[in-house]
Image (spheres, helix red, strand yellow):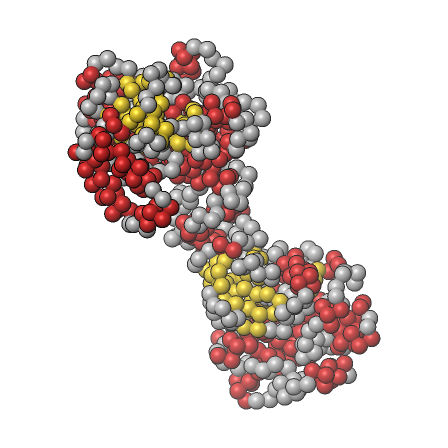
Amino acid sequence: MDNHSQSAFVSIPRSLLEQTIDLLRKDMLRQHESHREQHVETLFQLYTLSGFYPLDPPLQEWEISEVQDCSSALGGSADIFQGLFLGRQRIALKRWRQFDPSVRMRRLQREADVWRTTRHPNILSFIGFMADVEPRTLISPWMDGGQLLEYMASHPSVNRFSLAAQIATGVEYLHTSNPPVIHGDLRGPNILVSAAGHACIADFGLSCTTLTACADEFSSAHSRDSPAEKSGGNLSQTYSTTWLLAGHPRWLSCELLAAETKEEALRTLRSDIFSFGRLLLELFTSKIPFSYLAHDMSVTLKVLNKESPQRPTNLDDHIWSLMEHCWHPDPFLRPNARDVARSLCAAVGPPVKAFQWYTNITFNDYDFSTTLPDPLPPNLQEYFLKEMAKLREKMVYHLPEDPTESLESLAQVYSAIKCYPSDILHECEVAKSKSQPSGEGGFGKCWEGLFLGRHKVALKCTHCTALDRERKETEREVRVWKHLRHPNILPFIGSVTLDSEPRIYLVSPWMDSGDALRFVNKNRHIDCVKLLLQIAEGLKYLHSHNPGVVHGDIKATNIFISDQGDARIGDFGLSHDLAQGITGNFSTAWTNAGNPRWQAPELLSGVEDRDDAVSRRTTHSDMFAFGRVVLELFTGAVPFAQNLSSMSIAVLVMTGINPAKPSAADIILEGFDDSIWGMAERCWQTDPSARPTADEMSQHLQALISSRSLDISK
């Protein structure tokens, strides 16, 4: 067939291609031998393109040629010969040694019935069988690499993780087929490798397809019903005692070796996983399991005693852990094929990752729909964080596979404990909800987003176009913010880089009520004194933290209001800890940043005189700004609201002039009186040391709230 004809066949739908093959073969079966040859090439090309060949009727002698006179390889109970299919493809012919024709036919039919239903790159293809000639024969492609150990002996530098991943993928395919397929004899001699290093699972002589396997795999982990009990006890009637007792003790699971009844001897998906664990040992050591024991009886005794093979030296901890997990004495504690395949495939890449094995992680013991203790006991919080860390590590390791299931579990626990095990977030954990920013301030923009697919968050990044400077500013903010935990401090969730953007986004909970200035303007009857107390408590926490933290940019738009109406201090872009003193490495832009409406006079004078020691923000300058916030909350406007020039405001502040006392009647009705005004003026004193501390302001506000409560009660 020329290239033009072949390309024409490629464009034919697969179903039509298979129908064409079927019709052409049936027509050739009726033709005289002399007329078949001209169509064999076309038939072979169609087979090559589709991977399909009709199984009915069985293969004929004219389709198989050049069979060797002696066996090329030996199977457990069959001989393997080499031949040609349609005169072109090298094939393997499997012929049972059993002399009784009825037994031979029954075995061939059982193996063919299972094998013919499979189609997967890591399952050896089933071409067909010859039933009309003796001996009865199963046909499959010839694998030049030979059996697994033979291939590794001739290719010592082969990537063994790649082979393991291919075999595991084949097992996953079998176990997740509908109905699931139990291979029943997973071991090195039944893994064949092509010359190119492509591994395929072969030899389905001990395999079975049963709906019971499906029930066995997906039943509750606490169920101990046997497959026979689930099916009424009739499964074993299909299989002979010889078939049930077949298998090799070096790979056979402990429960099958210990079986006392036919029902107990039935192979399961979990016994396959046990054998796969032994196969992994074979693969990574190039030796059969228990290679140091010469006699199979010694091996059988050890397996019955639930002893494992000795651990080889220089074997990676994670791959050994996987092996031990696979051959766990309790079948219900073994992993499933899907999890095994996922982990091994992740180690192969791309990108290539160091292999890691994770056991199943669940939070089934806890009902997160109920309210957990608040605050959460330290031991319980530590437990949840550790389990979340393991689940998160497993999720990230298995990317790019769909992380939705893991994200849902993490979101559920995060809802309950409001903590997360890492502040360096992966882009799969955070998503922008909108393409345009939801807000913009002096130092950056803010987007609305989703954390763990469920929790609304704010994503903040700086305006800076110089990436190195932006990185340093972001790192400084994170360094301060990440350690802060207080009811009146906006929580820091983490930082993330999204969509290959060079910028880092800082992630925090989204506050639907917005900032404090917006909140008081929408809720004019709100208790501003209560909000001020909460802000003072937040500042008290910052200033008394170890080391103490100077916020550096206290103003109403940097105070956020939670769903419960509580104030939370946010935006730590101009913050620093007191341990840095005046020697901290701060840029001129950072030092000069800030708005004179809230800045203390000494900061403005220090900038004017280029005196870093004076211009450095302090707890005293924070309290000056707090006084301005007092004015903001009661008036609903920024300080010096009528003056739009920053330069003229800076001059006023440096000469000791403060905003005028509000006199509007509505502000007085909202609780603004001489005591509130006096509190603001104390914060604005020219001498920084004369200003009240956050602790003193908190006590004053608490006393004010108490006295007002007494006045109301009278």
Give left or right: position of 664 versus 590: left
Residue 204 % position (x, y):
31, 27
Q: Is residue 549 visible?
A: no
In this view, the residue in front, 346 or 665, is 346
Q: Quadrant of residue 193?
A: top left
Q: Quadrant of residue 645?
A: bottom right
Residue beneath the point at 48% across and 79% down? 522
Residue 568 % position (x, y):
56, 66
Give left or right: position of 626 versus 421: right
Does residue 127 sit above or below 704 in this rendering?
Answer: above
Quadrant assignment for the N terminus: top left
The outermost residue toward the left is 30
Give the number of marks.
0
Q: Quadrant of residue 88?
A: top left
Residue beneath the point at 56% across and 85% down? 668
Does residue 90 sit above or below 244 in this rendering?
Answer: below
In this view, the residue in front, 151 or 536, is 151
Residue beneath the point at 67% across and 79% down? 597
Give left or right: position of 79 versus 100: right
Residue 391 % position (x, y):
48, 45
Q: Is residue 434 visible?
A: yes
Residue beneath the point at 27% across and 29% down? 63
Residue 582 % position (x, y):
79, 63
Does residue 59 sit above or below 427 in this rendering?
Answer: above
